[in-house]
Amino acid sequence: MSLGNLDLRGLNPAPVTPFTVDGDVDYAALAGLGKFLASVEGVKSLVVLGHAGEGTFLTQDEQVKVIETLVAEVGDQVAIVAGITGEGTKVAVEEAQRAVAAGAKAALTYPSHGWLRFGYQDGAPQDRYRAIWEEAGLPQILFQYPDNTKASYNLDTQLEIAGQEGVFWTKNGVRNMRRWDTEIPVLRREYPDLQIFSCHDEYLLHTIMDVDGLLVGYGNIAPELLVEFIKAGKAQDWTAAKKIHNQLLPVTKSVYHRGSHMEGTVALKHALVARGILPHATVRSPLLPLADGADVEIADALKAAGII
């Protein structure tokens, strides 16, 4: 598989995975969500099976069917990118091979999650990306985890991965603006063709001027405004970007300024209900429902932002 014309500069939403009230994946609702997102001009891909999509909470068969469902619904309009989250390298390779067979065009390669607790050995992340490319042939997005985890790659590791065959993009969620401000320019200088995306849902204004696009769960609920946000950033139009930031701030607070970033996934589903795109906000354990009244708070935030 080659990169071809897969230009992801723009908005790359990470769709949630809808469930039925009985807890099964609601593939019809997923197709509807994909159709809505793909209809927004400026959306370049849908990145599934990540945190917003509760991807690690799905069975292997469900993961494959999620990809297949979106490929069938919108695969001729936007690329479907699969989150690859398997713990061991062999497991991740097999996951990537299933994603290729299901129609995914690229991978968002997560760190091995044992590294979150224990850290990684030098060279281990590079080996993970190399194996997925060589054994599955899947083009990859380098995923930079938050600075407060032990799975956050140092700059040398990022540069080495970005220089490997098969790595064309990076999704940076370091959530340390000192590192962002010093490391992103180096990545840009050393690899001018590397497409750089921010996934800082709660820090979009700080990062929007430096990127080629966004890869965010936020793209589920405000794709129209985020497309305009990206345009403002690319034009280096601070005034326009700040205006959109201020407009979105009630939504940002209601969705992402919560006790845990994982609660943002539940909040996204409530927002999609408020927009009339999902029938309800059911999530799968270990996620839990939000407190009573959260749905009203989130709907009010969308109204304040002019989204509904």
Image (cartoon, rainbow, N blue to C red):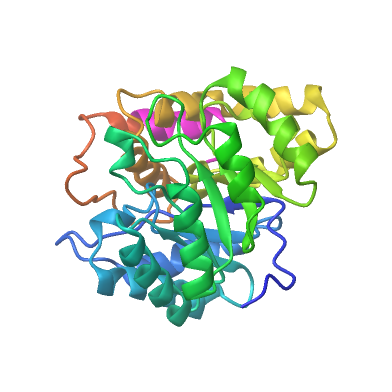
Residue lying at 36% horizontally and 60% vertically, measured from the top left: 89
Q: How far from the left and from the top, in percent, is residue 157? A: 55, 40
What secondary structure prevails in the magenta region? helix
Residue lying at 23% horizontally and 34% vertically, measured from the top left: 290
Q: Which residue sits furthest top?
A: 178
Which quadrant: the N terminus?
bottom right
Q: How far from the left and from the top, in percent, is residue 95? A: 36, 69
Specify start and end residues of the magenta stretch as a single range: 297-308
Residue lying at 72% horizontally and 73% vertically, measured from the top left: 4
Q: Nearer the viewer, residue 104 or 274?
A: 104
Residue 260 seen in this snapshot: yes
Q: Which residue sits furthest front?
A: 122
The quadrant holding residue 291 is top left
Q: Nearer the viewer, residue 271 or 141?
A: 141
Q: Is residue 113 left or right of residue 145?
A: left
Q: Is residue 123 left or right of residue 215?
A: left
Residue 299 lies in magenta, yes or no? yes
Above or below, comparing residue 166 to residue 162 in the picture: below
Above or below, comparing residue 201 to residue 51 in the picture: above
Q: Which residue sits furthest left?
A: 22
